[in-house]
C-alpha cells in the first residue's frame, strides 16, 4: 500500500528503507556452504577459496540466483557442520554406503582414485601387500572416508597411525619423515607436492586403494526441500551448459 508523505517525511522514509536494505544479510536464503582443502578440487589461494569444485559451486549459485558464503574448514569440522545444520552444503565428498542416508546428494562431479604412497627414495620400505603397511607409520587425514575405509579393511596399531587435520599437514609430515606412508587422492598428492616445491615424481603409488567411487556435493538431510531442488536443478543446468566439462579440462586434465 502506498502512502503519500510530505517531502521531508518521504526522504526520511526512503533513507530508512535504504538502511534496512543494507542491513539485510547477503545470504538471505540461509544457505551455508562449507568445504575443506582438497586441491585441486577445493583449496585456498591468496586468501580466496578456489578450485574445480569451488568454481562449479559458484557457477551453480549464479544459475540459481543464490548468494552464500563459502567457509574453508578442516574436514572433520566441515563434515560435522553439514550433519548438524540444515541448509548447509558440503563439497567435495565421497558418496558411500555409510553416508548414503545422511545427506541429500548432488552429482557426481568427478572421479576419485585413492593410493597408498611412499617416497621413491625410501628403499627401506618393502610392501608386498597392503597389509604390510602395518609395519610402518601411516599418515591419514582425520574423519576422511579414505582413512575410515582403510582402517576398516586393514588392522593397524594405534601407535603406527598419525592423524592430521588437513591434506596439507599430512603431506608435510610425510615429507619430513614423521610418517613413512600416506593415503592420498592422486590429484591432491601431485598438486600438493608442487606447492611444496617438490616434484610429483618423487612419490611412488604403491597400491591403488579405491578407484571405483566419485566425489559429490552433499546437503544436510533436513534442508529446505525447495532449496535442495533449486541447487540440484542448478547443477543440471551447469552440467548441460558445458561449464562442468570446461572446468574439468582446466583443473583435471588427466581425468
Image (tube, helix red, strand yellow):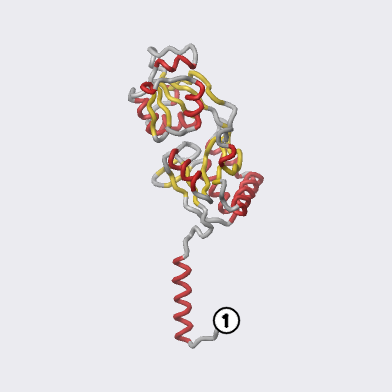
Tell me the crowding category of disc 1: few under 14, some 14 to 19, or many 20 or more residues within 10 angstroms, Cα based.
few
Residue at 47% of width from left, 22% of height from top?
116
Query: Where is 127 relative to 171, above or below?
Result: above
Q: Please identify the residue farthest to the right as the structure is shown.
A: 240
Residue 74 at x, y = what percent? 42, 40
The C terminus, quarter of image:
top right
**Residue position marked by numbered label 1 in the rendering:** 2
Residue 185 at x, y = what percent? 49, 29
The N terminus, quarter of image:
bottom right
Query: Where is 47 relative to 187, above or below?
Result: below
Residue at 47% of width from left, 65% of height from top?
24
Residue at 43% of width from left, 20% of height from top?
156
Which sits in the foreground, 225 or 71?
225
Residue at 56% of width from left, 41% of height from top?
102
Which sits in the foreground, 120 or 179?
179
Query: Where is 106 relative to 158, above or below?
Result: below
SS state under label 1: loop
Count of labels in the image: 1
Q: Please identify the residue farthest to the bottom as the structure is shown.
A: 6
Residue 50 at x, y = what percent? 47, 44
Rendering quarter of residue 215: top right
Residue 237 at x, y = what percent? 65, 48
Amino acid at each position: 500500500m502506498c502512502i503519500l508523505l510530505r517531502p521531508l517525511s518521504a526522504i526520511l522514509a526512503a533513507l530508512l528503507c535504504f538502511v534496512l536494505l543494507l542491513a539485510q544479510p547477503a545470504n538471505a536464503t540461509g544457505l551455508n556452504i562449507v568445504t575443506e582443502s582438497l586441491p585441486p578440487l577445493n583449496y585456498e589461494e591468496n586468501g580466496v577459496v578456489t578450485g574445480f569444485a569451488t568454481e562449479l559451486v559458484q557457477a551453480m549459485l549464479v544459475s540459481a540466483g543464490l548468494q552464500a558464503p563459502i567457509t574453508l574448514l578442516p574436514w572433520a569440522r566441515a563434515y560435522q557442520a553439514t550433519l548438524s545444520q540444515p541448509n548447509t552444503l558440503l563439497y567435495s565428498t565421497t558418496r558411500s554406503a555409510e553416508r548414503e542416508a545422511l545427506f541429500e546428494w548432488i552429482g557426481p562431479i568427478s572421479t576419485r582414485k585413492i593410493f597408498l604412497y611412499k617416497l621413491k627414495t625410501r628403499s627401506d620400505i618393502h610392501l608386498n601387500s597392503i597389509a604390510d603397511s602395518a609395519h610402518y607409520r601411516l599418515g591419514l587425514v582425520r574423519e576422511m572416508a579414505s582413512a575410515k575405509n582403510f582402517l576398516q579393511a586393514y588392522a593397524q596399531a594405534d601407535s603406527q597411525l598419525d592423524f592430521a587435520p588437513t591434506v596439507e599437514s599430512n603431506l608435510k609430515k610425510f615429507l619430513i619423515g614423521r610418517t613413512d606412508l600416506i593415503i592420498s587422492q592422486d590429484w591432491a598428492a601431485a598438486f600438493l607436492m608442487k606447492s611444496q616445491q617438490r616434484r610429483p615424481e618423487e612419490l611412488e603409488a604403491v597400491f591403488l586403494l579405491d578407484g571405483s567411487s566419485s566425489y559429490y556435493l552433499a546437503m544436510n538431510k533436513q534442508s529446505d526441500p525447495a532449496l535442495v531442488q533449486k541447487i540440484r536443478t542448478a547443477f543440471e543446468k551447469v552440467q548441460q551448459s558445458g561449464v562442468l566439462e570446461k572446468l574439468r579440462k582446466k583443473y583435471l586434465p588427466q581425468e
